[in-house]
Amino acid sequence: MTKKLAPIVLFVYNRLNCTKRTLEALQKNELASKSELFIYSDAAKNENDLEKVAKVREYIKNIDGFKKIIIRKRKANTGLAGSIINGVTKIVNKYGKIIVLEDDLVTSRYFLRFMNEALEAYENEPRVASIHGYIYPINNLPEAFFIKGADCWGWATWNNKWSIFERDGKKLLDKVKKKNIERELDFNGAYNYTSMLKDQVEGKIDSWAIRWYVSAFLKNMITLYPGQSYVQNIGFSKEGTHTKIKTNLYKINLVNKFKFSKIPANEDFVSQKKIENFFISMKMSFFQKIKFKITSYCK
């Protein structure tokens, strides 16, 4: 690896145990000691969160294992979306590229290596919006593949690609409707991305990720995914911002080896179909669980 490594930006809030697991895994990464780490700590949004935020801030001030650590403590609560959008924009515009994590993502020791090598390999590919570290528990995927859009569970991008990000969800939704691509956006109806965008526009959810996905999708841009996951999401609990239902549907085994080869930057429709089928099975599994709980309760 010849070029300068991308800075890592980690966004934390009030989940001390998740933050510890995220940072402990990141410290074990091969390239951690050579990487700069920026930690953005959002301020408490209410009195109930004051102590939890304080505990997280006390923990992160003693972190080591990286080339350089810069901690940014926000004085006022900006919310998840505002914190990520502003933090990513500032760092990526200064450094040209960025690796982004939230406080509920445990990484493989090869995560940083995968991200940095892919960033270097696809920097000059105009259609590649980002690199993603997580992939769903799906069998028989290729070593790596591209699908349209962008994603949010451990990802990386460049300043010129992040520049396509549209903050205004209504503008995005209007374009989606004008192009009549709701079904395509939703993996042929398998996942409710359009509904998520509507919820963001109506203020029901505070999501930056849906706007990133749709921004890239509308530009016909693609994201690189690994065939085996470098990231595990541990945030499915009542403490999560958008993941309050506890579930094992997204649970994977982290990849324990590293192999990276550049592939052509083209959509892989076979892998996309497998993800679509996973979304369908996930939806069926979810409703089966709900039905079981209702039936059990009624009895």
Image (cartoon, rainbow, N blue to C red):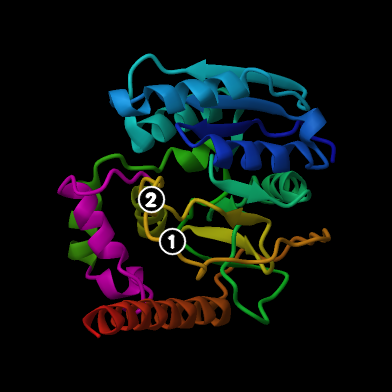
Q: For mark 1, what is the residue?
A: 246
| Amino acid type of the residue tagged 1 in the rendering | Lys
> What x and y, as percent, mark residue 196?
27, 58
Could you tell me if the residues under marks 2 and 1 are in contact, i.e. CB atoms within 8 Å?
A: yes
Q: Residue furthest front?
A: 299
Q: For mark 2, what is the residue?
A: 238
Q: Residue furthest top?
A: 75
Q: Residues within 10 Å of mark 1 (few under 14, many from 20)?
A: few
Quadrant position of the C terminus in the picture: bottom left
Front residue of 145 and 138: 138
- Residue found 23% across the figure and 66% down from its top: 179
Which mark is drawn over residue 33?
A: none
Q: Which quadrant holds residue 38?
A: top right
- Residue found 67% across the figure and 46% down from its top: 119
Element type at mark 2: loop
Residue 84 lies in magenta, yes or no? no
> What x and y, as percent, mark residue 28?
79, 41
- Residue found 29% across the figure and 43% down from its top: 206
* Magenta span of residues: 180-208
Q: Residues within 10 Å of mark 2 (few under 14, many from 20)?
A: few
Q: CA distance from mark 2 to mark 1?
A: 8 Å
